[in-house]
Image (cartoon, rainbow, N blue to C red):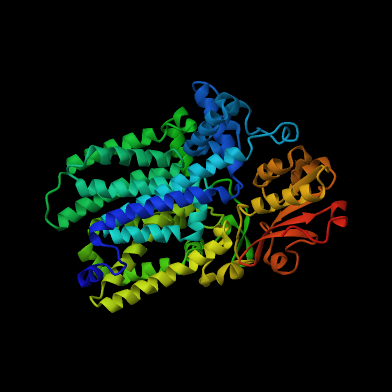
Amino acid sequence: MTSFVRSNPLLLPRLTGKTIFYGLALTLLLLMLWIQKDFGVTWDEWMQGHYGKLVLRYFLSGGVNHDFLTFAQTMYLYGGLFDTLTGFFYGILSGDLRHFAYSGLHDTLEGISRQDIAGSGYFEIRHFVNAVFGFLAIFYAGLTAQKLRSWRAACLTLLFLALSPQFLAHCMNNPKDIPFAAMTTMALNYMLLFFQEFPAPRKKTLVLLAVSIAGALNIRIGGLMLIFQLGVFSVITASWAFLKHEKIDLLKLAKYIITLSLASYFGGLIFWPYGQLDPIHNPLSAFAQMSKFVGATSQLLFQGHRVLSSNLPWYYIPLWVGIANPLFFHTGLFLCGLFGSLLQKKIDPRLLAMTLFAALFPIAFVVLRGSILYDGWRHFLFVYPPLVILAAIGWDIFISFSENKIIRIILSLLLIAHLAQPLIWMIRNHPNENVYFNSLAGGLKGAHGNYETDYWGNSARDCAEWLGKYHLQNYPEKKITVATTAFFMSTYPYLKKALGDLYTPQILFAQEVRQLPPPDYFIASSRKMTREQILGGAWPPEGTLYEAKADGVTLCAVVAVTNVRSSAPSETLR
């Protein structure tokens, strides 16, 4: 018994570490698939879903239909893997794929009041698939940690990612950044495995490595950096062999890298029609544009000021990563650095260098290039899994450092205390885990008014569902118009499901152009507001009937606008 505790203070028997890892992974998968149903529709989901529909048209027409080139300015610069798959699944399950490709998700807002678009069922499928991709990111991060250190480090990686509130929330309804993070993390895992197995890598490793890189390219052109990483990792491998006076077949290595790069590159065009139209020029043009986030200039709230996204300081992403994640992550990275000399003895230095490069190079690239950034750190969620791997390894070595059983138990309890804080916060504020901030930012209350919180409108679902119940209970036959500062599709599926023909959406720009009458209700978001407006009494707005909150902070509000307010009951559904 003494040797058992001494070898594994977290009570993870070394002989069954793999079993425990897969047990944790299965439990996490089932949990993620269960809770994904609680999350709302984000601002970009309708646009991306519509793009996926246009990509389906391209395939159904045999490549003749190019409607995808005319939609949403630069949407065609993205690969269509996620949106095409989810559109395909919805089309098959709804009984008519062609009908969905040509008639689902209206091209314009004109037809919304006359004919329904794809309802909440479409977004339920999207969120289910999104959660699967999110799980893959977490799962492959765990496998990578095992290659670097141990099954205990793998288990810690699973727990750390699952208990990172913002990352887990993005796993549920972020169809851009989470699928990309899943593919890049999978690619990192198989890259490390490839260099471990070289000069005789297994066919399975080669195939899955090519598939993962191609998958990333089919989501975002940034997947090209994975091919660049292959080259860098080859240099690391060759340099290490030279320093150790070991023989290495450079010609064989070069042949593998060239073959993998070509297979991944052209495989990355399968779900990307724009890339297929000119396989050489178009991907390179897309990379040049997307690396600068052309067309994304806007104002956002940062450190208490409204700042142009083109004028953000260089530390924008590092600061966001610092304040948006639990302190066990920071502590783990510190411990990893503190025990750096031990890492060289216990971990293959080549693999460690590769993981560090995968985590840090993308951030360094955008800082040096001066890319336009916005929406917090979501575009860089893909660097979080390799960073968490390093943090988990830091904790693993820290706990293993002492041979004293009591000290190991104390250190394990310290880690459990670190994990408890975000877990409790997530339970209390579900499904608004996306607005978590750690104590470095003063928590959500400290971040409120200083940083963007619910910038993608996840909490709008709560307000829409409340309004649907409230209106049916009090005015079961009255038709209403509802406007929102959140994107209307964040509220539309839920209001339409609850109210049917009683509900008509009103688009704010349409009211200004067509001089429509004021809406009956207004679902308000604090996005685009200044710190003075948020904290100075303008938020939530006058006439608020209901507030969607997290940690005591109002994220979204239902406001009565017209005579509905004057006759509204004094007690509302809270």
The residue under the point 36% across, 41% down is: 212
- Where is 50 relative to 309, above or below? above
The residue under the point 56% across, 42% down is: 124
Q: Position of residue 284 (x, y in %)?
A: 43, 38
Rendering quarter of residue 329: bottom left
Left or right, 3 with reference to 63: left
Left or right, 537 with reference to 5: right
Residue 10 visible to an observer of this rendering: yes
Q: Nearer the viewer, residue 231 or 418?
A: 418
- Where is 91 relative to 302, above or below? above
Rendering quarter of residue 452: bottom right
- Where is 427 relative to 234, above or below? below
Residue 364 visible to an observer of this rendering: no
Quarter of the C terminus within the rendering = bottom right
Quarter of the N terminus within the rendering = bottom left
Q: Position of residue 316 (x, y in %)?
A: 51, 62
Rendering quarter of residue 385: bottom left
The residue under the point 76% across, 61% down is: 541
Q: Where is residue 281 in the image (x, y as percent from the top left)?
A: 44, 33
Q: Nearer the viewer, residue 183 or 290?
A: 183
Left or right, 242 with reference to 143: left
Q: How many labels does the image show?
A: 0
